[in-house]
Amino acid sequence: MSFFDYFKSKKNTSASVAKERLQIIVAHERGQRDLPDYLPQLQQELLAVIRKYVQIDDDMVQVELDRNKDCSVLELNVTLPEH
Amino acid sequence: MAKIIVVTSGKGGVGKTTTSASISTGLARRGHKTVVIDFDVGLRNLDLIMNCERRVVYDFVNVIQGEATLNQALIRDKRVDTLYILPASQTREKEALTQEGVEKVITELSKTFDYIVCDSPAGIEHGALMALYYADEAIVVTNPEVSSVRDSDRILGILQSKSRRSELGLEPVREHLLLTRYNPARVERGEMLSVADVEEILAIPLLGVIPESQIVLNASNQGLPVILEDESDAGQAYEDAVARLLGEEREHRFLTGQKKGFFSRMFKG
Ligand SMILES: Nc1ncnc2c1ncn2[C@@H]1O[C@H](COP(=O)(O)OP(=O)(O)OP(=O)(O)O)[C@@H](O)[C@H]1O
Ligand SMILES: [Mg+2]
């Protein structure tokens, strides 16, 4: 690195912005990759069950599959409305 | 048994055909009997880069549909005599490339060739899936640019789930990153993703870095695979990539910009 590079902030170059955006989108898309076919159906049925008790919108139930080496974790996030 | 190599990318226009032409020429001129297949049905291009467009009589789809034999359709390169081209059809529908048809042709070629290089069309549709299905190795052509890197990652996902090797639970397709149209000066100015950035995101071994070069267009204008431009940076970078593909260790070149004198460095700002 030259003396002058020292003054150039590496952080806000357009390349570093590109890298950051890519890391986020690629991680997200890898997570979505070949999810089991039953996931959307599961999400709908969970919604129906929860709606028996609480009134919630479609986007308030989130189902994600977190794959690990030995096991996968099905993560269920339900946001309840304020009373 | 031939080794089957797909040249793929997801994104269009990143340099797949340029790469297929040079890699196949490089393998062949080292004495390996090589055939390069154009999978871009409807948009054949490889024949132009290989300078054999006026010698095309029959094509890949003719062979699949039994209208011609492989020997009738294969075109022998005029420069490198261990190199053959199987051109794509100009007019047919993409669906003409049936899986059984492709398998039949590849199986037959495997008997006599050492390497089968498959030039994939852009996208992740039928044609691209057919091109990668039988691959043993994949050269993922990527430009240092967000949409290209993202598409490369998607293609890697497809190689890992939809290729023959993945479906049969065989040893996975061997993946290689080929970064093309690389501009070191822009990387140094922070305007372009660096080799290290792309390697970190895609996390596959680096086969080579091909600099952005005027020579590539000049060569394709003349129907010359750029690897035959032995004096050029892009040609030498492709030659290095071929050597690495064959297991040789070669240091990466052309990763830095023009050497600058003391004064231009002083006043760079
Ligand atoms: N290293 C390079 N330097 C400069 N120009 C290049 C380089 N590599 C490829 N090109 C140019 O980029 C354009 C697209 O290249 P090419 O046809 O090989 O891409 P492709 O991935 O096969 O495209 P398609 O997706 O349409 O099949 C061409 O004009 C080619 O000359
Ligand atoms: Mg092409």
Image (tube, rainbow, N blue to C red):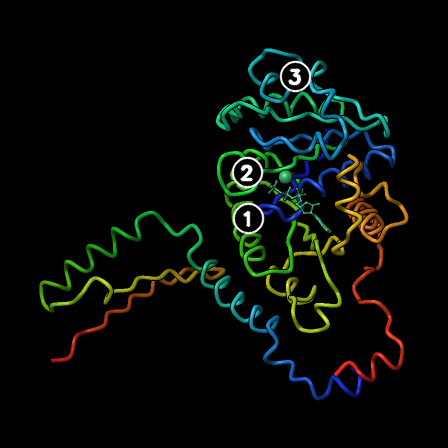
Numbered disc in front, either 3 or 1:
3
Q: Which residue is mark 1?
A: B155
Left or right: residue B139 versus residue A49 is: right
Distance Cα–Cα, label 1 vs label 2: 9 Å
Going from the N terminus, do you reach mark 2 or mark 3 first? 3
* Whether labels 1 and 2 share one chain: yes
Query: Secondary structure beneath disc 2?
Result: helix
Residue drawn at (33%, 65%) of the image:
A75
Question: What amino acid is found at the position of numbered circle 2 in the picture?
Answer: Ala
Query: Secondary structure beneath disc 1?
Result: helix
Distance Cα–Cα, label 2 vs label 3: 21 Å
Q: Position of residue A37 (x, y in %)?
A: 34, 47
Classify 10 Å Cα crowding around label 2: few (below 14), some (14-19), many (20 and above): many
Question: What amino acid is found at the position of numbered circle 3 in the picture?
Answer: Tyr
Q: Is mark 1 within 8 Å of ligand 1?
A: no
Distance Cα–Cα, label 3 vs label 1: 30 Å
Going from the N terminus, do you reach mark 3 or mark 1 first? 3
Q: Which residue is mark 3?
A: B58
Going from the N terminus, do you reach mark 1 or mark 2 first? 2
